[in-house]
Image: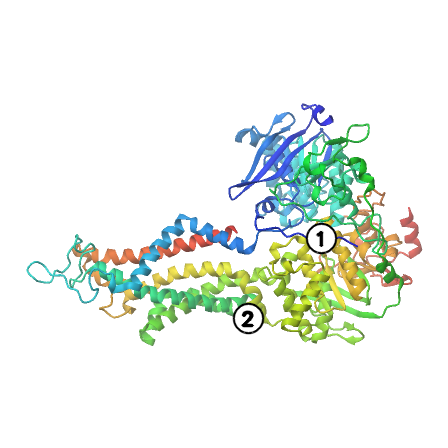
Amino acid sequence: MSDLGTSAVTGPEAETGGFETEIGGSAPGPVISERKQARRESWRLIRRRPSFIIGSAIVSIWVVCAILGNRITPHHPLDFRAKDSSGLPALHLSPRAAFPFGTDATGRDVLSRVMAGARDVLKIAPMAAILGVLLGVIVGMIMGYLGGWVDLVLSRIVEAFLALPVVLIALLAITTLGRSDWVVVGVVAVLFTPVVARTVRSAVLAERDLDYVTSARLRGETGRFVMFREILPNVSGPIIVELTVRIGYAVFTVATLSFLGAGPPPPSPDWGAQVSEGFRVLGAGIWWTTLFPALAIASLVIAVNLIADSVQSVLDAS
Amino acid sequence: MTLADAPVITAALEVRDLEVAYVVRGVDREVLRGVSFSIAPGEAYGLVGESGCGKSTTAYAAVRYLPDNGKILSGSIHVAGDDVIGMNAEQLRRFRATEASMVYQDPGASLNPSLRVGRQITECFTLLGQSKDEARRSSIAALARVRIAAPESVMDRYPFQLSGGMQQRVVIAMALACNPKLLVLDEPTTGLDATVEAEVLDLVRALRSESDAAILFIAHNLGVIRSMCDRVGVMYAGKIVEEGPSQAVFDDPKHPYTVGLLRSLPRHGIRKTDRALATIPGTLPLIGSALPTCVFVDRCPLASDVCRTEVPPVVQIGPAGDRYTRCHHADRIDDLEVESVTVDIAMLAASEHNPDVLELSHVSKTFRQRGNSIPALVDVDFTLAEGETLGIVGESGSGKSTLARTMLGIETLDQGGDMALDGAHLQGSTSQRSASEKRSMQMVFQNPDSALNRSWSVRRILVRCVTKLTGLKGEEANTRVEQLAAHLRLTPRHLDLKPRQLSGGLKQRVAIARAFAGDPRIVVCDEPTSALDVSVQAAILNLLADLQVEKRTSYLLITHDMGVVRYLADRIAVMYLGRIQEIGLTDDVFNGPHHPYTEALLSSVPSVDGEATLRIRLDGEIPTPANPPSGCVFHPRCPRAIEGVCEVTEPPLLEVAPGHSIRCHIPIEELRILQAK
């Protein structure tokens, strides 16, 4: 009788280190760490990164603002009007203890409006990003897996899309279709699809030629099964990274659209709309109505990118 | 003791009690646990052992090329008397420029792809202080030294314009530029074809006589080490367990690990009908794990209590004082049993005249690429009988894998050919085949890491395959998977793991289980063991042989390893440039008279047995199939080509003896005489 030869499975204490470093090794070394352990490990590594801590702290602040809205703002973002001692509206008050971010052209509290404005952007941007990534995954998967003329045709379409100025097309679409949250979500998602598709395509190309795909075809699996059951779990890393990056871009794009007037109508405390209202009086030295909403946009974009960055570097390392 | 007495000054490389650890997430994981050896000037020293034993780490430590997380804990390294560990950055740079050189496994990766070869070589010489003109002259001389025929023209080329063998020559020329005192060769021929490997090894052998560099040779191929090295150290889990002159160590091993390693190799021409291969029970300990006093004790058939409590002594062997083994039971080595013949397999071989399962007639496959047609398979005919193993051998690019893929329907064969399964016409493409035809033909891939979906559990992989191929569902499918797994000696615990949690051998078992999920008639095994260590290889080969006896499955075995094909195959087909050059019973093909290409393949394999082999050498590399040579496609490389005949007409595949066909213009009798010499 031949012996078992290789019967042991190592416990969770086994790590990858040594085998990766055995550079000239002739054959793959035995057993690497448990997958769940590895996932927990990467999560632990992500949480330890300063960029992740800072990024998620900022994002959580905005999420709290978005959820609680009026309940935590110092004043009502729409109805409140600041008054001076004589009871007249206090317009364009510069930042002070009572109004840390000052007041705007109609005497509303800028701080309250910035806080409340988080809701609009956090409602739309992640949805747009998720939808865009979903569409991109489907298109990219088809391009990468089927290859050939399908890939050729879709690639040209993707390139054509990439050549279009995103904001211009979005404005056109919103003007044509009318403004609603769903239209903004849809338009931004469609505009993101080609970029995501390209990322997914290249990840799928690397997987397509692996033998497990050949093996699936040998037992007669359908293309759909191979694409979404066999390959998809193995390209989830780049897709997660892409999703976080896209959320950042979506915040930016949605804010830009509001700035250009394609956002929610005036009384709304939308950040982009606030910047656009405020910047007209910038020349008169009234900087606070522009700076604070702009900072809000920047902080959210940067925070999301910090998270994306740490997710990417941990996934790359493992 | 010899070790301690070795004069430090004269040794080209002197390693003492070297302990190295890799820091993984803040924890030291020990890889080398006290390695000591020395190499005299002009001597070649080989390190052998399975992957993960620390041989490459030793080599990298010797020239201080350890990766960033590598840490030398203790011990000393001296090259020609200089302390390597104590060097600062500048000393180290000068040391690497002038005293030590390294040649890596993949020559393509060692050369800068965007610089001409000449520029890269001259750089080595300008670094040594030569002027531009001097450096150019030296470079041409260096290339000539590594037997490159037209050095000037090679200087003007880019690495990608050179073949693998030529690239490795260039790398060796660069390594020798500084006339190093120590040359480290880390698996220098592993990525190369057998015939090219033979060429490179010949070159290294010739260079040894011209230079007094000490060579540290790392290889997992024991045959290569035996043919190249004066002395050898056998490594296991970061320790040298046995050391001595390579011939003595390989002919008469004195450590249980060396014995196990050598017995697990298919050698001395043994066949599956002779005996099962010996295996080493258990697995290599993980890097960094705490080990008992004797590192091998958990897998050792001779182990006793003393092995766990006391460090094994260094036992000197023979009067010469040049051999030692680290074993408490060195005197009992001869008690290790040799396993006996497997009766079943012997019986299988006796029962001949099995019905044919698969028949290929005039099968060709032409790829189209940018308007060119590339014939990858040309007019292949053969039959595969029930329960038979047909071995396919040939260099890379000879069409072995295309043949397998065409049979399986992954590639569709050209018009004009035909395939028949059990006498019935077989559709060319997998998608057009019936469920039972798909079920009949399955495949075991070379690399289990690529063949198993890494995000699926073993159970899911097998259940899906059973469901798809046999139609069994739910609990029934699960029961079948559990039976299948038990059959392949996988425990239920393994079923719920992901592939990456399994060792290489276990992964390959899962891949084999998957291929056998639907009780196939034919299994294509594409290099099933070349990604595995030898002790694991033996277990897998035994398993394949056992399964075949039991299930009467036919195998198409693709391999470059002559020992493996000889062990497992009943018949062998030798392919070159998409054509079968020779096909016949294993013994006929091995014993000859054989096709000159077969002859070259056989003589290029360095044998661990040290048997005298006829050495005929092939020049150059396999031509591109897009532009095959005229006449016999092998004639430009054939040492026996007949001028005026071979380059004009392609010889037919003629039956020279019952069941033995050769495609050659030279008559069989003449081949017999030529090859008898």
Tell me the tag on residue B41: none
| Residue B145 can be seen in this image | no
Q: SS class of the residue under badge 1?
A: loop
Please report the residue visible at 44 percent of the width from the left and 61 percent of the height from the top: A243
Residue B484, x across and y down, in percent: 70, 64
Residue A93, x across and y down, in percent: 15, 57
Which residue, as the protein is rendered here, is positioned at the far left? A86
Please say if B249 is above or below A286. above
- In this figure, what is the number of numbered marks? 2
Q: Amino acid at mark 1?
A: Ser
B482 or A151: nearer the eye?
B482
Q: SS class of the residue under badge 2?
A: helix
B445 or B114: nearer the eye?
B445
The chain to which mark 2 is attached is A
Q: Between tags 2 and 1, which lies in front?
A: 1
Residue B662, x across and y down, in percent: 86, 59
Residue A221, x across and y down, in percent: 62, 71
Q: Amino acid at mark 2?
A: Val
Q: Quadrant of residue B386?
A: bottom right
Read off the residue under disc 2.
Answer: A150
The chain to which mark 1 is attached is B
Q: Are marks 2 and 1 on the same chain?
A: no
Please report the residue visible at 78 percent of the width from the left and 73 percent of the height from the top: B420
Please say if B255 is above or below A129. above
A39 or B669: nearer the eye?
A39
Q: Residues within 10 Å of mark 2 (few under 14, many from 20)?
A: few
Q: Residues within 10 Å of mark 1 (few under 14, many from 20)?
A: some
Tell me the tag on residue B530: 1
- Residue B610 in the figure: left or right of residue A64: right
Which residue, as the protein is rendered here, is positioned at the far front? B305
Mark 2 vs mark 1, CA separation in Å? 36 Å
B515 or A296: nearer the eye?
B515
